[in-house]
Image: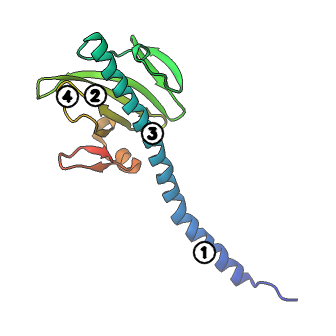
Amino acid sequence: MKGFTLIELLVVVLIIGILAAVAVPQYTKAVEKARISEAKVLLKSLVDAEDAYVLATGEPCGTYNLEDLDITLPGTIKKESGRTHIITKNFEFYADECLESSRGGVSLDFYADRIGKNYSVRVVGNGYGGDKPGIFFCWQEHNEAAPCQQAGAIKNADGEWIFQ
């Protein structure tokens, strides 16, 4: 009767362990990238709905209350300080910071805070002279680079972390 020796079994287990050590981090990155893509799609929908709101009402900054927008997002609605937050399994979406840009216009920023992680996906509203509309930034507290790097963001020429 032929069988495997202990050495042969150990070699097979070692090879499987090495493959798992390489594959698991890549799998984790791919999953996080897919989640960020989900946030980008929902943020883009919010920006478009906010543009329609601005055109309909004439309010330069749109609205911080996401319920005012003509859009239905998946998730649970949470009210906080007069603003609406939408909470999904992976992100908390909200509007914040209506800022005047260097070009003289204003725009509303939208955020998707990654639940359980230390970063947010941020997009500046389209218009009205806003700086860098349509770019998805990685925002992290205390200007730490590690959360954005781990999420797959890259540093652009201006030193900002962005998602491509």
Check disc 3 and report the residue beneath it.
117
Q: Which residue is mark 2?
A: 125
Going from N to C along the chain, the mark reached first, 1 or 4, is 1
**Mark 4 in CB contact with mark 2 (< 8 angstroms):** yes
Residue depth check, mark 3 versus mark 4: number of the one nearer the observer = 4
**Marks 4 and 2, Cα distance to the nearest angstrom?**
7 Å
Q: Tell me the tag on residue 94.
A: none
Measured in 3D between alpha carbons, the distance from the residue under mark 1 to the one under mark 4, in whole angstroms, is 53 Å
Which sits earlier in the primary sequence, circle 1 or circle 2? Answer: 1
- Assign a secondary structure to mark 4: loop
Specify the quadrant of the image occupied by residue 19.
Answer: bottom right
Q: Nearer the viewer, mark 1 or mark 2?
A: 2
Give the residue type that dot 3 points to: Lys
The type of residue carrying mark 4 is: Gly
Q: Nearer the viewer, mark 2 or mark 3?
A: 2
Rounded to the nearest angstrom, the CA distance separating label 3 from label 4 is: 28 Å
Q: Residue at x 32, y 39 (%)?
A: 136
Which residue matches tag 4?
130
Could you give the CA–CA distance between mark 3 and mark 1, rounded to whole angstroms? 32 Å
Q: Which residue is mark 1?
A: 15
* Marks 3 and 4 in Cβ contact (< 8 Å): no
Residue drawn 40% across and 13% down? Answer: 68
**Can you say whether 146 is above or below 111 in the image?**
below
Vertical side of 116 occupied by 145: above or below:
below
The reply, left or right, for residue 130 in relation to residue 163 is: left
Amino acid at the residue labelled 2: Gly
The residue lying at 29 percent from left, 10 percent from top is 57
CB atoms of marks 1 and 4 within 8 Å: no
Residue at the extreme right: 1
Tell me the quadrant of the picture where the N terminus can be found. bottom right
